[in-house]
Structure formats: C-alpha cells, structure tokens
Image: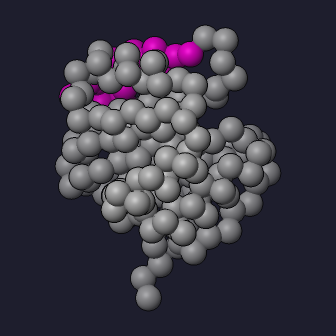
C-alpha cells in the first residue's frame, strides 16, 4: 500500500499486523482518486474526514494531492496512522481514537464540517449506513461523501448519488453529495 501521487508520491504506508482491517487495495484507491480528480480540485478541499481510517491511506492521499487538512478516526490503528502521517511529513492532521459515533457528535458540537468525507467501515455490520445517517443528522458534510461497503449492502440516504462503482463481487464505493433543493 502506497501514496499514489502528489507531495508524498510513492510513500509506502505501514499497515497493521494481526488486525482484521481490510485496507483499500491500491488499484481500487487509484481508480477512486482518478474519479474524484474529475469531480473536485483537491487544492480547494479545506478539510477531509477519514472515518474507520485504518492506515489513513484515503485521507493521506487527499493531503498529498493538495487538501489542506485531515481528521482520522479509528478505534485500533491510531499509532499506525500517526506513523504514516509522520513519515509523510504532514503536520495538518488530527488523529482521534475511539467510537466513531461519539467522535462525530463531538466534531459536530465543535461546529466542524468537512469538504470530503471517507467512510470505509468493516463490511456487513451496518456501519456504512450508520455512519451515513450520522453524517446527515449532524450536518457534517460540505461536499462529497465516499462510502465503501460490501457489495451486498444497500445504502439509503438524503444525499444524491454521484457515482456507484462495483469492484468484483465484494466491494462497492458510492460517491454522494448533498441534494440541491
């Protein structure tokens, strides 16, 4: 696993050992960021939120491409994220360890919103839908929301589907944005 392009291009990311994490494959990440680059200008992204961050690969890729800052949330891999952030020499990152629901509520109470949100939870536990519901309820999104989930999971949201990409029989990525009314 590596950073694909930008300031930290080629940096190999440390990955967890003995954890049941499922890092986004390089080919999937490369495809996703190719699509995102056609939708947004990363240098205009002020704040990225990476929920269920794992290695931090999605938020780090965003910063490498020009996003201003990233907040990472995970319950078990914050030391690995910190190591990857340090090796990438990014000083504009916040790493939060704990229950994503409590942390999202705290971020909302602080009045924070995010231009780009990634949610890549463990599959088949209902966490993709739960995180999307919280993002909506807490009004955390200023822009795009990218949710990676198991192909068998079906999401319902108040956001407009921009693009849905299936990778094999196991992974689906949905790119969503707030509906314009």
What is the total number of numbered labels drawn onto the structure image? Answer: 0
Q: In the rendering, at what x and y percent does residue 166 appear?
A: 65, 49
Q: In the rendering, at what x and y percent does residue 118 appear?
A: 48, 48
Q: In the rendering, at what x and y percent does residue 111 appear?
A: 33, 62
127 sits to left or right of 64:
right
Q: Is residue 13 magenta?
A: yes
Q: Is residue 2 magenta?
A: yes
Towards the viewer: 41 or 158: 158
Residue 161 visible in image = yes
Which residue is painted at 57% across and 75% down in the image? Answer: 158
Q: Main secondary structure of the magenta part?
A: loop
Towards the viewer: 32 or 137: 137
Q: Which residues are magenta?
A: 1-16
147 sits to left or right of 40:
right
Residue 119 visible in image = no
Which residue is painted at 58% across and 50% down in the image? Answer: 101
Q: Residue furthest bottom?
A: 181
* Above-or-below relation of 174 to 63: below
137 sits to left or right of 170:
left
Q: In the rendering, at what x and y percent does residue 88 appear?
A: 28, 21
* Above-or-below relation of 123 to 41: above
User: Which of the 4 image quarters holds residue 20?
Assistant: top right
Towards the viewer: 19 or 102: 102
Which residue is painted at 49% across and 66% down in the image? Answer: 138
Image quarter of the C terminus: bottom left
Which residue is painted at 33% across and 41% down in the image? Answer: 70
């Amino acid at each position: 696993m590596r950073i694909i392009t930008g300031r930290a291009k080629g940096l190999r990311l440390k990955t967890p050992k003995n954890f049941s994490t499922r890092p986004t494959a390089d080919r999937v990440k490369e495809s996703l960021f190719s699509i995102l680059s056609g939708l947004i200008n990363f240098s205009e992204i002020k704040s990225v939120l990476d929920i269920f961050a794992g290695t931090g690969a999605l938020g780090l890729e965003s910063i490498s491409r020009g996003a201003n800052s990233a907040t990472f949330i995970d319950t078990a891999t914050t030391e690995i994220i910190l190591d990857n952030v340090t090796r990438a020499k990014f000083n504009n990152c916040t790493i939060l360890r704990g229950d994503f629901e409590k942390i999202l509520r705290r971020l909302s109470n602080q009045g924070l919103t995010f231009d780009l949100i990634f949610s890549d939870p463990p599959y088949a536990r209902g966490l993709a839908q739960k995180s999307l519901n919280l993002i909506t309820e807490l009004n955390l999104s200023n822009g795009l929301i990218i949710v990676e989930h198991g192909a068998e999971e079906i999401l319902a949201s108040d956001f407009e589907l921009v693009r849905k990409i299936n990778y094999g029989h196991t992974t689906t990525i949905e790119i969503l944005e707030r509906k314009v009314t």
